[in-house]
Image: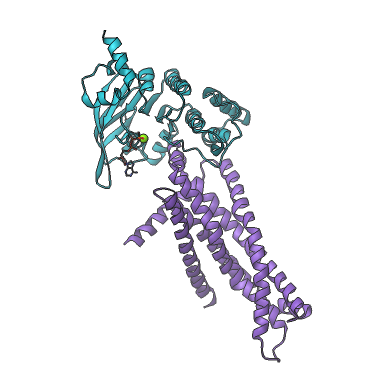
Chain colours: A purple, B cyan
Amino acid sequence: MKIFESIGDYCILMAKVFKKPQKMSVFWEHLLKEIDKLGVGSMRIVMIISIFMGGILTLQVSYNLTNPFMPKYLIGLGNRDTLILEFSSTILALILAGKVGSNIATEIGSMRVSEQIDSLDIMGVNSASYLILPKIIACILFNPVLYILSVATGIIGGAIVGPVTGVVSMGDYVEGLVHTFNPFYVTFSFIKSLVFGFIIASVPAYYGYNVRGGALEVGKASTDSVVLSSIFILCADLIITQLFFK
Amino acid sequence: MIEVKNIKKSFQGREVLKGIDATFMPGQTNLIIGQSGSGKTVMLKSIVGIHEVDNGSILFDGKEVATMKFKERQKLRQEIGMVFQAGALFDSMTVADNIRFPIDMFTNMTKKEKDMRVDHCIDMVELENAHHLFPSEISGGMQKRVAIARAISLEPKYLFCDEPNSGLDPVTSIVIDKLIQRITRDLKITTVINTHDMNSVMEIGEKILFLYQGEKGWEGSSSQILHVDNEDLNRFIFASNILKKVRAIETK
Ligand SMILES: Nc1ncnc2c1ncn2[C@@H]1O[C@H](COP(=O)(O)OP(=O)(O)OP(=O)(O)O)[C@@H](O)[C@H]1O
Ligand SMILES: [Mg+2]
């Protein structure tokens, strides 16, 4: 029963969020700040993780290619497709759900418990839209950018680790990268990253907005929201994959 | 004018407001007094609509809030200024930006006009040299004053202050009290102040409502309050000896 209530509350909140901003100039300013904080602020961690993962994936593919007749370029291809299809979209979204999600839940939650949200409401500001809309839009807009960044740095990671460890030559690796490239994979992951961007921002925002109590509850809301948005991301991945590859 | 009719409010089955009637007139300072936990904050929050009341009605200038449409309520709220007990400043914004926020949100002033308005509000609460500081960087009393400046930045029609001078020294307390009284008179706004500070009561209490365990214990003005025959009220007022002495002198 509780779960239906929560879904209902979530939908009601989203209906409040997706209203035309009361003051466009304030909204734009706010949106830029959020893009900077949630998006640009995540670029470094995305690059670090992706460069390592690209390297690791390259090693894994090569060590699993035990048949000597298998062409070496498969290593580049394997790395590329894993990054494009799942790693840079889904795994990255899970990582961002932790970083960005806990940030959003904590920020909104502490505003709730310190009565800042009540204060906005009393002024006649639509607090849900004012606080949450810029975050959701920022995540939806910037998540695909992070996706591209992740694919690029992951490929670079492979290009460094492969030749350095000697598992694949640069020539073979690059040949793999361009071999039978299917642009649809990118479109598919792009769509996923839009959906994930929405989940990463909206689920923690819901948790933060509905916190009751004090600092302790804010911490709990933050943890709970990361768990739930991770589950949502994986469910969404499953559904979208089934829809597109059927 | 704000009219409150028989409002009741419970939390988890415990009744905090037990049917309160009150009328708050514009241009005068209306005080709600009472011990800690008597329900002052709940009453104020119920009037402004942060808490939904379980029973009773609340009328702003004759219009019942419960029957208002969303847009109307939004409009009404832009005419309300509120100072929360804990300040509730936006901690991601500087002092000046906190005060500027309602102005940015609801007016189309030019940047220059806004700056002037903000400076004017900061002057009113005597807060020079704090423009660029964040709420975490100023003292509790300064936070209160910023909250007041923010509440009056749009020249509200209704002003609610939840213990505006708790945590302030006696000098600043009086300054704040007088300030609130002055803008109340000058702008003919309806002001409701929660307090348990007897200094404020004696200084600016034009109309006083005494809450006792969620009920209206007494109602009157500061000139009457020292001579009332109400045990609960007397216990509250004469908790400090000074006022006992004042009464003794007055009755002589
Ligand atoms: N959100 C809430 N949930 C449950 N109980 C509440 C809530 N808010 C207030 N109460 C209860 O209502 C009672 C009155 O609280 P209120 O905050 O109105 O007191 P107060 O008169 O403002 O006291 P103080 O002078 O200390 O601020 C208290 O017993 C409090 O526990
Ligand atoms: Mg209180």
Q: For this rendering, which residue is in front, B62 or A127? A: A127
Decide if residue B1 is in sight here: no
Residue sitting farthest toward the top: B252
Q: Residue A193: x percent and y percent?
A: 57, 64
Residue at 42% of width from left, 35% of height from top?
Answer: B84
Q: Residue A246: x percent and y percent?
A: 52, 78
Residue A54 location, quadrant: bottom right
Residue A244 location, quadrant: bottom right
Decide if residue A227 is in sight here: yes
* Left/right of residue A96 with respect to residue B20 in the rendered view: right
Q: For this rendering, which residue is in front, B64 or A86? A: A86
Rendered view: B113 above or below A176: above
Q: Residue B205: x percent and y percent?
A: 35, 20
Residue at 69% of width from left, 67% of height from top?
Answer: A153
Rendered view: B163 above or below A223: above
Q: Residue B234: x percent and y percent?
A: 25, 23
Quarter in which the N terminus of chain B is drawn: top left
Residue at 45% of width from left, 49% of height from top?
Answer: A215
Rendered view: A187 above or below B84: below
Q: For this rendering, which residue is in front, A120 or A61? A: A61
Quadrant of the rendered image holding ligand 1: top left
Quarter in which the C terminus of chain B is drawn: top left
Residue at 76% of width from left, 76% of height from top?
Answer: A164
